[in-house]
Image: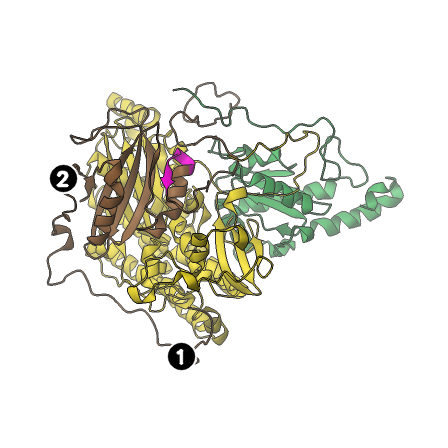
Amino acid sequence: MTGTPPEPDPTVWSTTETSEGAQELSTRGGTGQVELGRELGAVLRLAEGAVVDPDDIDIERRDDDTMIINMGPQHPSTHGVLRLMLELDGEVVLRTKPVIGYLHTGMEKTGEELTYVQGATNVTRMDYLSPLHNELVFSLATEALLGVELPARAVWIRMLMVELNRISSHLMWMATNGMDLGSTSMMIYGFREREMVLSFFEKTTGLRMNHNYIRPGGVAADLPDGWEDDVQVICDTVFERTFEYDELLTGQPIFRERTEAVGGITAEEALALSATGPILRSTGVPWDLRRTMPYLAYDKVEFDVIVGTYGDNFDRYSVRLNEIRESIRIVRQILDLMPAGDYRVQDRKVTPPPRARIDESMEALIHHFKTFTEGFRVPEGEVYVAVESPRGELGCYLVSDGTSKPYRLHIRGPSFVNLQSLPVLLRGGLLADAVAVISSVDPVMGEVDR
Amino acid sequence: MTSGEVEAAVVPARGAPSPGTAGAEASPTSRPPVPVMPDVPRAAGSTLDQVAFPPRERYHDMVAAFRDAGFELCADLCAVDYLTHPGRRLPEGVRPERFEVVVNLLSLSLHQRVRVRVQVPEDDPQVHTLFDLYPGVDAMEREAFDMVGIRFAGHPDLTRILMPEDWEGHPLRKDYGVGRVPVQFKAAPGPR
Amino acid sequence: MGLEDLQHNFLTGRLEDLVKWARRNSVWPATFGLACCAIEMMSVGAADYDISRMGMEVFRASPRQADLMIVAGRVSQKMAPVLRQVYDQMMEPKWVISMGVCASTGGMFNNYAIVQGVDQIVPVDVYAPGCPPSPETLLHAILTLHEKIRTGHIARRPEGAAVGGDRPPAGWVPQAPDAVRVATPR
């Protein structure tokens, strides 16, 4: 593509500049009309009355009127290694181009080398703020191809863990969003609450993060004794504290000024850009996969789908804050409705036998050996399964060729797609609002770059 | 949308609860699949999907027809390299090629998903872009180009998105190695 | 770098102790959180595993004002030059903690996309294992670094270390993995 760079002298290790070439934003003089039209939303499918006249696009601004600055990838407010190239006219943002790939880990390629039992360890590190959702979608896709039916307790344990994960992810978002807007105490409060959820996760799954707990066939281990008390304490404490956050943030005039009417997006633009999750719900579209295309046992619990009105930062904040409350409501119902039974399917071709049985039965030993070395075989086929992660629609497209490793594992990361709405959200706003808007999109670079 | 005049009045609390699923109408999942271009070969997918296999020339028109039939959102677009699995199951009338572009569409009004799989030959790996129908596929098509090497004709900015600009090769192709570094005492070439 | 030019003798010993005490009790980290380990690093900065008791809660965004770079997370091929540039911009004395297995050795991602250990790019002082390391592990790594600062000699540099931070010693060649970008026939 581009010319080969000159051979570096190995005794001199220094870098003068880092450049991503064609991936960056070029000056106005060097950009085509279609690209410039994106500045005014010309390519988005707008209603008939709102169509942009190509002559309206301001080509009078010359290269030296505007300034292209670079933000990131090392920057305290880019929520990970996101690099933004911004074109500014004074303080007003005109065009934005996110440059990603700074955390690309080749997880989809690695997923083709790991068995289905090991696959959860790989996908769980994509969206590292809600790892149980990644494991869940991978396990659901595998089970759809396997055609196994899970016992009820496994389904409800999964739902409990996934909702607690949603609470911890949204608390983390509240903490970092508060920090980005200047409220350091929100950061401390958010992490304090999150520690309670993480210590419950450590008790149940063994790890605070990246748990590898939800596996094809069920979950890795049953809930520990006394889990009801722990979860009850979490629910009560976090619910009380959401009202403290209301006092700290929602009622505060500076917070309101900084978030209302900032970073707005309409429902048509959000749908055109394939944005899902709180971004879509903040525009007023009541689309939540837990309600509209239920999976696990979400059709058996009561909860509300929170929608906003204006699609601005404040709406996304209130959507996420109220989703914490709705998740607590779901967890309380799970506490009452949790069935007894197996925590994983008993099919020995899929789930390994309990460790104690290995000493007694030759068959159990062979199954254990086969499951952990070769892995279980999944019938040939392809499937797309989606769940509602805290960031939007998290999908898994899995192609199996009949062996014990996936042929193609593709994870549809919601943040990857939601980042495309960033140029629309930042358009016409101030640079100081850019930080708040990036934070309200809630990107997690692990699932953006995979 | 711009941060011009911010209203000084207190905005009422958001958070309107949405009605539950117990409505008077029939369950959305019991509706039949949308009949779009019925002459294109189809397969029954798992999890309520219908999967369509249009030929490359009709791919863009089929997706446009789906969009007009109510599929407002393009959930996912990815590419698959079938180099080492040429014998996959396909419906009659569909000739297998090395690459496939898989598009998952979602209808919010009908609560349905549909999948479109188009075969892309190895010697001419390009298809028409869907950017004019769904602007949200911009980044997804760039990723398919970067990882598998499919060119999308008509895409406004087809550059690499995940790998560095000067990278050679397309990592998710089956003839591109994983790039394992040999690790001491691990002679067996296992998964890692 | 004024103290490094001094002759090391019993007169400067006391001064060295004072300087080392000051240096280790206010090590300011640079924000270099990349992936999951960054979340645990933020937990260390938060209330439960407070690093403010070691004087470290000020994460400096500008590398010019930072002493410590905690490489928290996996370093991809695209990020490697940026990492080196940030390290070069830090002022002496500076230290690097490689947090997590991905930063130490490449971790579970032994593939084309991840640099197999950040010590291929920058000299590392302390390695903290874990995936992710729990905040207690990171605290232990920080205390190990404090020990290293306390017992290290200022006026005499250990041999083989990068002098001046910008240039490796003569003859040192960066170790690039052999198997990158190779088409492996199946």
- Residue C71 percent location from the top left of the image: 58, 43
Q: How many marks?
A: 2
Decide which of B55, A385 is in the foreground and name it: B55
Residue under the image location 39 percent in, 45 percent down: B155
Q: What is the span of residues highlighted in magenta in the rendered image?
A: B146-153
Report the residue that reaches farthest toward the bottom.
B9
Q: Which chain is yellow?
A: A
The image quarter in which residue A69 lies = bottom right
- Three-letter code, disc 2: Asp
Q: B59 or C155: nearer the eye?
A: B59
Q: How is the image coloured?
A: by chain
Residue at 36% across, 30% down? A112
Residue depicted at 46% across the width and 33% down the height: C108
Asked whether residue C133 is drawn in magenta, I would say no
| Residue B16 shown left or right of residue A107 in the figure | left
Locate the C terminus of chain C by quadrant: top left
Asked if residue A219 can be seen in this view, the reply is no
What's the colour of chain B in the image?
Answer: brown
In green, which chain? Answer: C
* Residue A173 image offset from top left, x and y in percent: 44, 58
Looking at the rendering, which quadrant does residue A49 occupy? bottom left
The residue beneath circle 1 is B10
Q: What amino acid type should be assigned to the residue bearing mark 1?
A: Val
In the depicted view, which residue is nearer to us: A237 or A326? A326
Residue identified by numbered label 2: B39
